[in-house]
Image (cartoon, helix red, strand yellow):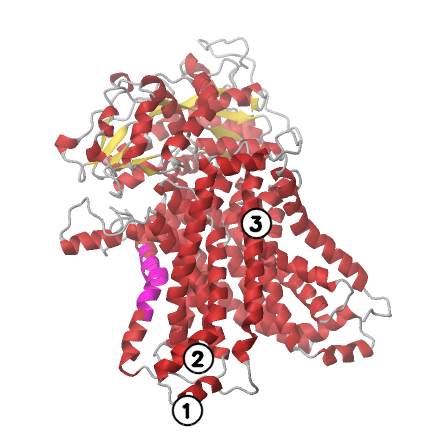
Amino acid sequence: MRRRTLIKATALLPIGARVVSAAPAAEPVTPALIEAATKEGKVTYYTAMDLSVAEPVAKAFEARYPGIKVSVERTGSERLFNRIAQERASKIYKVDVVNSADASHFLPWKRQGWLAPFVSDAMAKDVPAEMVDADGMFCNQRTHLCPIAYNTKLVLPADVPKGYQDLLDPKYLGKMVKAHPGYSGTIMTATQQIVREIGWPYLEKLAKQKVLQGQSATEPPKKLEAGERAIAVDGSDYQFWMAKERGAPIEVVYAVEGTPLITNPMGIFKSAASPNAARLLVSWIMSAEGQQFIVTLSGQYPANRHIKPKPGRPLLADIKTFREDPAAVEKQADEIKVRYTRYFKV
Amino acid sequence: MTPRRFDLSLPVLIGVVILLAAMIALPVGWLFVYAFADKEGQPTLDNFVTLFTDPSFLDPLITTLVMSVSVSAICCLVAAPLGWLAARTDMPLARTLRTLVMASLVTPPFVGAIAWEMLAAPNSGLLNQLWRYLTGASADEALLDIYTFEGLVFVLACYTFPYVFILVANALDRMPGELEDASSMLGASTWQTARRITVPLALPVLLAGALVAFLQALNQFGAPAILAIPAGFHTLTTKIWSLFQFPPKSELASAAALPLLLLTVALLRLQSAVLGRRGYAVLGGKYGAPRLVRLGVLRIPAATIAMMVLALPLFLPYAALLNTALSPVASQLVTPATATLQNIKFTFWGLSSTMPALKNTFVLAVSSATLGGLLAMLIAYIVARRAIPGHRVLAFLATSPLAIPGIVLGVGLFLAYAQTLYGTLWILLIAFITIELPASYQQLGSAFHAVHPELEEAGRMLGATRLRTLWTITAPLLSTAAIATWCFIFVAVIRELSAAAVLFTSETKVVSVLIFDLKESGDVGAIAVLSLAMIALTALAIAAANRLGGGRLQARIAG
C-alpha cells in the first residue's frame, strides 16, 4: 500500500495537556487536516455499536464535514476481530478506524504494530488519562454496561430477578434470551468478568435454563422489546434504555452481584487508506460535539469529561460494576469460547 | 471428428479445461490437502480423529443426517400428491399452483427462515399471538416453536419441496396416457388406475426427488444458521462455518467438509442410477396426452388444500415480511395508524452498506449469468457435438460442482485464493459461476440436442469456423434456452448465501450476506425491507430478461 503523507501536528501543546512520553503530541483539527481528509473523500469505520447509533453518528460526521463519506461496517466485536485478521492475512487493508467492545483486541493489534498513534486535542485535554493508551494507539470512545433487563408485560413485579443467581430459578426456564461471547465483544468482556466474580458453575447451570441464544449483544434488547423472551440475561444497556425511552415495556436490572462494565476503545490502523479522514473522524467522535451526539442519542457514558451523562439515566458512579481487565480477557478468550460452547451447545 | 482445418478448437478446449480446473479442481484439491494436514502442514489424520470423536463435531453430523432424511420424507409426502393434482387432475388453479411453486423456489430459504421466525417464534410470533388471542391461552403457552429441530425441518421442507414437485409434475406430464387408458378399458376404476399404474410409474422419479431434497437439506446453510443457533444446536454446514471464524481452523473445516462432499457424491451416483432406470416409464410409441382424473366434488377442496400448502412457503412468510417492513416493532400487527416508513427510510438512506451491497449483488448476478451462461453454452456445445476429443472430460468437470456444497466450495476457494482474489468480486464471481454451472450446462446441453447439427454443418461447409458457426447459427436458435439459463443463474446468484458468507469482505458484501449480518444484530425491520427488495429485483430481472432478451437476440439474427 502506498504510504501517504500525514498532516504533521502543530508543534505547540496546549497548556495543561497531559504529557506522556511515548504518545505523540496532541493534534488539533486544522484546516489542512480537513482539506486532506476531504480529498480522501471517505473513511471506513468498523464498529460494534448498534446500527441505530453507529449510522446516525456517521451521518452526523458527514454533515459536519461534507464530502467525506463514512462506510460503517458493523458486526459483533469478535467477528470484527476475526474479519480484520483474516483480511490482513490476505493483504486486504479496508479498515481505517476501528471501535471494538472488546478492549483486549487492542493489545495484540498494538503489539503487532498494526495501529497508528494518534492523539487528538480532546483526547489530550478532556479524556481521563487512564482511558488513553500510553503510546496513543487507542482511546476509549465511550463506556457501556451489560445489565440484565426484563419485559414488564411478561414479568410480574414479584418475579423480577435481583441478580444472576436468581436467573437459575426454574421459573425462568425457557424465558430468557442471551448473546454469545463468540460473536459479541460486550459479551466476551462481560463473560470474563462474570466468570471471575461468580464462576463457571453459574453459566453451566444457566445453560440448562433453555436460553434462547442470540449472537450480538445488540440482539437481546430487540428480542426483549418484541416480547420474544421475558428476560434478557445480557445485552447493551443503552439499547434497553433507548427502547424504554421510546415507550417499550422494558426495565433494566443492575444485578446485586455487580454489572459488567465495557469500555469501547477506538484506534486508527497504520494501513489506513484514508489516514487523514480517519484522524478527522476520531477527532470528531472524541470532541465535545461528537461525544454529546452519542450521549444525546444513546445515553452511553462519555469518555470526554466535559460531557454530562444523559438526564434520566443512572450515574455510572451509582452502579456497582465489575472491573474490566482486558489483559485477562486476551488470555482467556479462547478458553471462554470453548467452554461456553460446551455448555450452551453453540 | 477432429477438425482438419485449424480453428480455435484446441486452444478453446485447453482454455476451458484450465478455467474449470482453476474454478473447481484447485479449491477441492486444497480442501483435501488441508484436511490431511496439521497446522504446520505435516500429513496427519488427526483432524478426522477429532471430527469423529469430539461430540461437538459428531452431534452436528448426526443432526444433519436426521434433518435431511426428515426433510426429504416430508417433501415427498407433500410434493407427490400436489404434483399429481397439478399434472393429472382437473383441479382448478393447476397452472397458478405451478407458478406459485416456482415463486417459492425463487424465495431464498434463509429469508423464509427469518420470516418464519416472525410468524412462529414461541412468544412474539404472529401465529402464536393469534392462537393465544383465539384460545385465551396464557402468555407462556405457544402453539408453535420455530427455534427447534422440528422448526428447522419444517422451514427447510417449505423451500425444498418445490424441487420434488417440479420433478414429479414434469414426469407425470410426460408419462404416456395409453397405459392408464388400457387400465381403464380393462375395467379398473380411476383410483385403481392411479394406484396401480400412475404411482408405480412415477415412483423412480419420486425416489430421485427424495434424493434431491435430501441433498438440498444437507447442503443448506442459511436456514440452519438462522434457526439452529438460537435453538442451541449445529448442523454440519453451520459447524463448518463456525470453524471458519478467525483464526480459521482451515484443517478442521476442510476435514468437516469432506464427509459432506463424499456423501453428496455418493448420493448423486445413486440418483443417476435411479434416474437411469426411468426408461420404463415411457415405453411405447406415440403417446396420447395424459388423461386427467376427474375429481368431481373434490375439485374445490383439492384446490383449497393446495393453496393452503402454498401458504406455508409463500403467503404467510411474505405477509410477515411486509408486516415487519411497515411496522415499528416486528411482533406487532401493523395497522394504518401504526404503519411507518421508518424501516424503509433507514434501510435505503440510513444504512451505509445497503447501496454497495445492492450494487455488488446486481453486478455479480448480471456478470455471473452472462459469463456463466456463455461458459455453459460453450461446454454444452463441445459436448453435444463432440466437437473436440476430450469432450467427456469437460462434461465431467462441468457437472462436478453439483457434488460440492456451497459452503465447501467457499472454503476451498478461500484456501486456494486467499492471497490473490479474496477481497475482490472475482472470487465471488468464480464461486457463483461454479455453483450454477452444472444446472446451466444441463439446461443448455438438452437444448443443443434439440438443434439438428445439419444447420451447423451447412455453416461449416460454407467456410465458417466452429466458433463463428456457434455464434451466428446455433446461438440464435438457442435463444429461448439461453435466456432461461441466464434468468436461472441470475436468480440463483441473488439468493446465494453459503459460499458468499465465507468469501465476502466489507467491500464485497452482497445483499444475502448483509441480511445475514443484520440478523446477527436482530435488525429485523431492515431485513424485511432488504428481503422484499431482493425478491423484487429477482422478479424484475426475470420479467425484463423475458422481454428484452428476446428482442436483443432477434436483432442479432437480423444483423
Residue with the mark numbered 2: B197
Residue at 35% across / 47% down in the picture? B524
Residue B340 appears anywhere in the view: no
**Disc 1 is attached to a residue of which chain?**
B
Residue B21 appears at what percent x and percent y? 70, 51
Label 2 Cα neighbours within 10 Å, binned few <14 / some 14-19 / many ≥20? some
Residue A232 appears at what percent x and percent y? 28, 34
Are callouts 2 and 3 both on one chain? yes
Are callouts 2 and 1 both on one chain? yes
Task: Identify the image quadrant of residue A343.
Answer: top left
Residue with the mark numbered 1: B185
Residue at 58% across / 41% down in the picture? B254
Label 3 Cα neighbours within 10 Å, binned few <14 / some 14-19 / many ≥20? some
Q: Nearer the observer, disc 2 or disc 3?
A: 2
Q: Secondary structure at mark 2?
A: helix
Residue B410 appears at what percent x and percent y? 57, 46
Marks 2 and 3, how far apart in space?
Answer: 37 Å
Q: Nearer the observer, disc 3 or disc 1?
A: 1
Q: Is residue A324 left or right of residue B393?
A: left
